[in-house]
Amino acid sequence: MGADSIEGTARLDTATTPARLLVAGDWTLAHYPALQRTVAALGAPLAVEAAVDFSALGRLDTAGATLLAGLLGARRLDALAAADGSLPAARRALLRLVDQALESWETAAPRPRRVPAVLALLERIGRTMAALWRQQLLLLGFIGLTLQTLARVLPRPRRWRPTPLAAHVEQTGMDAIPIVALLTFMVGAVVAFLGATVLKDFGASIYTVDLVAFSFLREFGVLLTAILMAGRTASAFTAQIGSMKANEEIDAIRALGLDPMELLVLPRVLALLVSLPMLTFLAMLSGIAGGMLVCALALDVPPAMFLDMFKQDVGVRHFLLGLCKAPVFAFLIAVIGCLEGFKVGGSAQSVGEHTTSSVVQSIFVVILIDALAALFFMEMDW
Amino acid sequence: MSAAADARAGAGAAPAVIEVRGLVNRFGAQAVHEDLDLDVYRGEILGVVGGSGTGKSVLLRSIVGLRRPNAGQVRVFGEDLLALPPERRSRTERRFGVLFQRGALFSSQTIAENVATPLIEHAGLDRAQAERLAAVKLALAGLPASSADKYPSELSGGMVKRAALARALALDPEILFLDEPTAGLDPIGAATFDRLILTLRDALGLTVFLVTHDLDTLYTICDRVAVLARKKVLVAGPLDAVEATDDAWVQEYFHGPRGRAAAAAHPARS
Ligand SMILES: Nc1ncnc2c1ncn2[C@@H]1O[C@H](COP(=O)(O)OP(=O)(O)OP(=O)(O)O)[C@@H](O)[C@H]1O
Ligand SMILES: [Mg+2]
């Protein structure tokens, strides 16, 4: 395949009778496009009666043999196999083999044609809508299945699985502490800056304290944590379960008479139910700390005064309202992550698609529920 | 081109395309290879045998440059792959075809695309040309036309092996590395497979590094056999020489019930 390779040629010499086909040079993959043009110019399979002269043939590989077999046609190859011309037996065998292979594929049914683009688009829209609807049913079913499994396992302490539960709490909770704390701290500082700037015009910049406190206790603490968990944990759940599915591990679990819901889903759901509320609490603290820092630096409100105002203005009910959303979010994020994992097909691409889908869905659900909850709490005057 | 004749004339005559010297491979505390030497000569079919977990696959991975050995040297075409600059290394790697033990097909492509991909990437063919060649390779490997548009997850175990062979053959390599190609094939398929390898070797002068547990394959197509045991190549040579080796494992392997049956089925060789 180096520079010393001579491009293959095929030439029909009609001066002699019968005509002679001169095959020369290297018939290899490296020269495939040129060889294909040569063969097409001669017209494959060769129609005229011609003797074939292989004496100048250099290298030959399966790519070249494919073209050569096409050029010579089955009948001539049969003749070639019987007689021994200028071609060694090994190469005749290769040509025959390739020819048989070609034949077996060409006599087979033609491959289905592709549909036109417009129809494909319509089909895709239809499929997406149907999938969206099916997805909702599936999610409801899966939630039911999870709760059912939980109800079955809870009364039997022997079937509790503390080890995987602890491992998942560590992965989803402990390991997320730095990122949650840092992120909410910064958002807290930003909210405080914003409050200070806007409220100054009304001479009410001291109420920045209330702004930070209310927003973090009621909304931002839990919402930011849930969104982070959706990105971090839902995707991890989907990828873990999805690769197990692609690798037939889920089938193996079933075949061993074990329940993948109990083995894989329950520990993950329970772990997130433990860690997300704890992280939410941490997020509230660190967001408020961020606000407190900005207040101390930019507004000359020392931490002691900040805390005083906090105690005075902010009731514990806001904290509870925020925190009560955490388990709901945790459950939904975990369930969506696991369900998408189970929906993975056999390919790596499918793992990627469902991981994306699980993050998008869980963020969407979290924000939707949060908005509904905000409406409800407002109507209830809580 | 008389590579086939070379191989039959005796391994000593042809130049070594793969030279392994003093290879050491360790995983943590576990040593898999300890000072292992092996030569593979141009145009031969070398059968590599050994018990499960003796490091055949690891040896294959070291040779094709997927694993950096802890010590020792591997030369392929006279070059140390791991020391080559990326461009030259890629050019050398194109002269290999590898069939991995578990197939390692690209799961998000159909098997026709699996075979066409290297053709498009490396040989500079357009899609139509690549698909036609891919069809030939798949047919050579014994797959029906109806399977071309299937994804790897939709294939049976034996079909995966065949598709992986078709992909290994895609670039018409000079060295073919096969890791247990006939495991999971039906006996008829395995025999066809053996004949295919032999035909290709004779016509193209391929060098074949064949890891196998299939005694029939050993008896039918291998020119030489290398036995891996106790972290080394215990013995490498023509089958009769290896069979006669005075080692408990080798004796058990070739003269156990299965070995005897396979030997009896191929009296011409043994
Ligand atoms: N990535 C890895 N990490 C740790 N150990 C490994 C790794 N790959 C292989 N091993 C170990 O190296 C040894 C040799 O493995 P290898 O896959 O080469 O066996 P093999 O000879 O191919 O066996 P088989 O015939 O069953 O395929 C085994 O003991 C295996 O546990
Ligand atoms: Mg192996």
Image (cartoon, coloured by chain):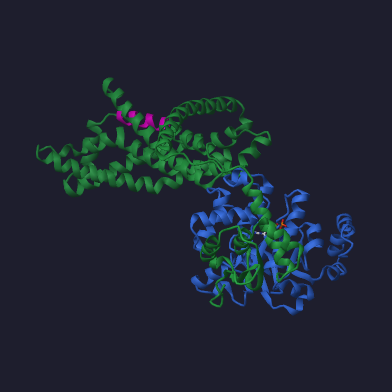
Chain colours: A green, B blue
Q: Position of residue A248 (x, y in %)?
A: 62, 42
Comparing B186 with A143, the one in front is B186
Camera-nearest residue between A232 and A17: A17
Q: Quadrant of residue B237?
A: bottom right
Q: How many marks?
A: 0
Q: Residue at x 74, y 67 (%)?
A: A89
In this view, the residue in front, A159 or A148, is A148
> In the drawing, does residue B59 fall left or right of residue A232?
right
Residue drawn at x 62%, y 27% as measured from the top left: A156
From the viewer's perspective, is residue A221 above or below residue A300? above
Corner quadrant of residue A145: top right
x and y, in percent, of residue A295 in the image: 20, 45
Residue B207 seen in the figure:
no
Decide if residue B160 is on the left or right side of residue A364: right
Q: Which residues are magenta?
A: A316-328
Magenta stretch holds residue A231: no
Say which quadrant the C terminus of chain A sits in. Answer: top left
* Rendering coords of residue B109 (x, y %): 53, 49
Dominant secondary structure (helix, strand or loop) of the stretch shown in magenta: helix
**Residue A280 lies in what quarter of the image?**
top left
Q: Is residue B174 positioned above or below A322 on the image?
A: below
